[in-house]
Image (cartoon, rainbow, N blue to C red):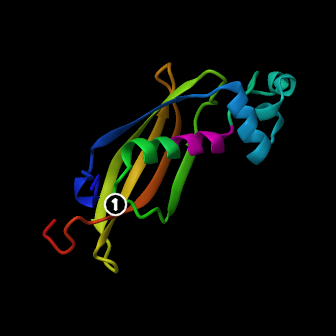
Amino acid sequence: MGLSFEDMEVGSVIECGEHTFTREEIVEFAEKFDPQPFHVDDAAAAASPFGGMIASGWHTCSVMMGLLVRNAFKDSTSMGSPGIDEIRWLKPVRVGDTIRMRNAVLDKRVSASKPDRGIVETQWEGINQHGETVITVRSKGLFGLRNPGAPA
């Protein structure tokens, strides 16, 4: 068994890997899910306030979710999430940017109604190759307990 509730320590940070955004993938994602001109058209993007093509914020979130699941939560006791509390797109993600993702544990508690699982509050951060934080996400995740009912 991989990561479980007991392994998630408040204050710990999990490095989740990195991803480089290509023009082709930015356009492909945007054409399907967020076809705003600055995501799909070079000329429109150049004339936009961004001055060039950028990735959709939803694309960035999706990439970060993939990094989290594949690299940090693989074989874990994750039971999904009751939701995202906050997303902040702080800087645009541009063609060729490499985003490194990390996930910090902010708080955790055993569920009062379902004591076989715990709720873990985290903050994801996406940091570009220049060391700039481009996105933050605050969320809660549900994780199974390795030993339900054992002292914390």
- Tell me which segment is drawn in magenta: 56-64
Above or below for 135 versus 120: above
Above or below for 139 versus 43: below
Above or below for 49 versus 142: above
How many marks are shown on the rendered structure?
Answer: 1
Q: Position of residue 83 (x, y in %)?
A: 51, 62
Task: Point out the image quarter for the C terminus.
Answer: bottom left
Q: Amino acid at mark 1?
A: Thr
Of the pair 73 and 128, the residue shown nearer to us: 73
**SS of the residue under disc 1:** loop
For the question of whether residue 54 can be seen, the reply is: no
Task: Point out the image quarter for the N terminus.
Answer: bottom left
Q: Position of residue 25 (x, y in %)?
A: 68, 32
Residue that numbered label 1 is attached to:
77
Residue 134, quarter of picture: top right
149 vs 31, left or right, is: left
Q: Is residue 58 magenta?
A: yes
Of the pair 62 and 76, the residue shown nearer to us: 76
Q: Position of residue 129 (x, y in %)?
A: 50, 20
Residue 63, quarter of picture: top right
